[in-house]
Image: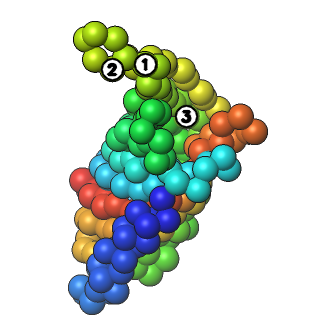
C-alpha cells in the first residue's frame, strides 16, 4: 500500500506544482451553487494490515453555497491477496452520503466531510482441489457506519481542480477503513 500511495502522490506533484501557474484572477473558490463531479483513486488501509486495497470512487456533489455542499461517493476496489496465494479480498462496492463544509481560500478550497457509508466486502479462499480443478469458497459481508474526512481542492481553472483527500470511512476495532486519495473535480457552474 505504501508503494501505491507514494506512486499516486509522486504522479500528482507536477499537477499540484503547476496549479497556481494558470491562475488569471478568476475567483475560483467563490463559485456559488451548482453540481460537480469528481473521481479519486487511492489506497485503503486498516489497522490489521500495512498493505491495502487500491480503490476508486466517483464523487457527485452539489454546492448549496460557497461554504456548504452535499456529496455522494460510489466506488470499489480490485482483488488483493496480500502475498497469500490462497486468499483474496476486495471491496465489491461502497456508497456514502456526506455533508461537506468548505473553507474557500484564494485558489484552493479546504473542506471537511461528515456522513455515513456502507461497504460490501467479498473474500475468496482456496479450500482444495477436485477432479475439475481448484475449489474456492466465496463470502460476502457488509459493514456500515459514520464516516468523516478532510481534503483540499487545488483549482486549475474556473471549473476544474485537483483533489487531495483523506477519509475515515469505517471505524471500530473489527473493521476500520481509511483512504488517502488523489483525483480530479469538475464543476458545472
Q: Give the x, y percent position of residue 150.
A: 57, 60
- State which mark lies toward you, 3 or 1: 1
Q: Is label 2 in a helix, a strand or a loop?
A: strand
Q: Give the x, y percent position of residue 98.
A: 53, 42
| 3 or 2: tag closer to the N-terminus | 3
The quarter holding residue 31 reads: bottom left
Name the side, left or right, on which 15 lies relative to 45: left
Residues 157 and 54: in front is 54
* Pointers 2 and 1 in contact (C-beta within 8 Å): yes
Name the side, left or right, on which 40 lies relative to 140: left
| 3 or 1: tag closer to the N-terminus | 3
The quarter holding residue 24 reads: bottom left
- State which mark lies toward you, 3 or 2: 2
Q: Is label 1 in a helix, a strand or a loop?
A: strand
**Relative to 20, does residue 170 appear above or below in the rendering?**
above
**Relative to 13, does residue 112 appear above or below in the rendering?**
above
The residue positioned 59% from the left and 27% from the top of the image is 143
Residue 9's disc is none
Q: Is label 3 in a helix, a strand or a loop?
A: strand
Looking at this rendering, what residue extends furthest in the right direction? 173
Q: Which residue is mark 3?
A: 117
Q: CA distance from mark 3 to mark 1?
A: 35 Å
The residue positioned 42% from the left and 56% from the top of the image is 42
The residue positioned 43% from the left and 71% from the top of the image is 6
Residues 31 and 125: in front is 125
What kind of colouring is applied to the model shown? rainbow
Amino acid at each position: 500500500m505504501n508503494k501505491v500511495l507514494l506512486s499516486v502522490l509522486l504522479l500528482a506533484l507536477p499537477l499540484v506544482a503547476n496549479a497556481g501557474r494558470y491562475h488569471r484572477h478568476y475567483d475560483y473558490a467563490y463559485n456559488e451553487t451548482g453540481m460537480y463531479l469528481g473521481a479519486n483513486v487511492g489506497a485503503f488501509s486498516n489497522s490489521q494490515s500495512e498493505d491495502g486495497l487500491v480503490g476508486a470512487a466517483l464523487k457527485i456533489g452539489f454546492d448549496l453555497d460557497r461554504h456548504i455542499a452535499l456529496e455522494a461517493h460510489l466506488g470499489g476496489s480490485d482483488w488483493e491477496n496480500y502475498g497469500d496465494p490462497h486468499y483474496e479480498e476486495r471491496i465489491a462496492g461502497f456508497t456514502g452520503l456526506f455533508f461537506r463544509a468548505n473553507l474557500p481560500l484564494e485558489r484552493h478550497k479546504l473542506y471537511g466531510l461528515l456522513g455515513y457509508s456502507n461497504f460490501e466486502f467479498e473474500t475468496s479462499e482456496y479450500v482444495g482441489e477436485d477432479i475439475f480443478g481448484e475449489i474456492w469458497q466465496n463470502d460476502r459481508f457488509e459493514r456500515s457506519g459514520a464516516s468523516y474526512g478532510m481534503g483540499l481542492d487545488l483549482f486549475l481553472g474556473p471549473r476544474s481542480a485537483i483533489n487531495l483527500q483523506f477519509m475515515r470511512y469505517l471505524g471500530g476495532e473489527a473493521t476500520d477503513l481509511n483512504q488517502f486519495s488523489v483525483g480530479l473535480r469538475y464543476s458545472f457552474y
